[in-house]
Image (cartoon, grey):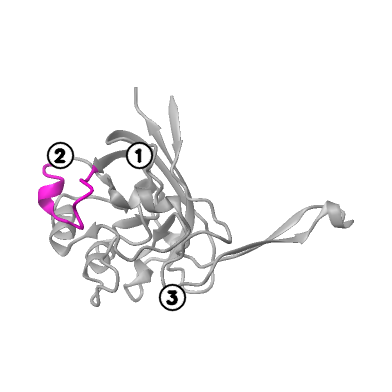
Amino acid sequence: MKIYDVTVPISSTMPIYAGDPPARVESAKSLASGDSSNVSHLDFGAHSGTHVDAPNHFIEGGRRIDQLDLHKLIGPCRVVHVADDVQTIGPEHFGDLGDAKRVIFKTKNSTFWNDSEFHSDFAHLGPAAADALVANGVELVGIDYLSIEKFHSGDHAVHKAFLSKEIVILEGLDLRAVEAGDYELICLPLKYVGGNGDGAPARTILIAKD
């Protein structure tokens, strides 16, 4: 059994979507300083690194992160490779997905994890692709950068198309070591209450099928 950890580590140098809170990972207590234990202080936005968008991110009154159906976050998953020259993913780039309920897109974005700079020219899903995936009955859609939608799209049509149907959005995946194919997905977002409940970082793994 081959396990791929596709989670981007949270760190003070990680790329952050423009306008989101920066991430800070600091030592609050340390044995080296004479404290009785090592204790870290973590400070980051809900959409840092590998994370899940809950419906409440764009749908007022939608499910919050602590209310997500865990069945959608665990199970068979299809990784689709999209050519590096594709900027806006359309239905023609993934074709017939059969009965796949969880679909993740590997794009040129995977190379962006090699540096800490935020890239606004990331590959993304277009509205037509979102509509096709909704029609196909998917439960989860993921991509290998910090947003599934065009940078500053204006209308957030892609997010709303998925989240209005309670389709989980999984963003910020590190797929550099992963090939296209079928896997088992395990994605567990941080469970918290308070705030807006709009999303959370998620330790995410893909398990290669025999």
Q: CA distance from mark 1 to mark 3?
A: 33 Å
Residue at 24 percent of width and 42 percent of height = 81
Q: Relative to the observer, which residue lies in front, 197 or 11?
A: 11
Instruction: Kindly identify the amino acid type of the residue bearing the numbered disc 2.
Output: Gly
Residue at the outermost top position:
210
Marks 2 and 3: in contact by CB < 8 Å? no
Provide the major secondary structure of the magenta segment.
loop
Residue at 22 percent of width and 41 percent of height = 100
Counting from the top left corner in percent of width and height, residue 33 is at: 86, 57
Residue 98's disc is: 2
Placement of 189 over or under 19, stated as above or below: above
Residue 31's disc is: none
Circle 1 is placed at which residue position?
Answer: 75
Q: How many marks?
A: 3
Instruction: Kindly identify the amino acid type of the residue bearing the numbered disc 3.
Output: Gly
Residue 19's disc is: 3
Q: Relative to the observer, which residue lies in front, 95 or 8?
A: 8
Question: Which of pointers 1 and 3 indicates the residue nearer the eye?
Answer: 3
Marks 3 and 1: in contact by CB < 8 Å? no
Counting from the top left corner in percent of width and height, residue 190 is at: 52, 56
Was residue 3 drawn as part of the magenta stretch in this picture?
A: no
Q: Which residues are magenta?
A: 81-97
Q: CA distance from mark 3 to mark 2?
A: 38 Å
Query: Which quadrant of the figure contains the N terminus?
Result: top left
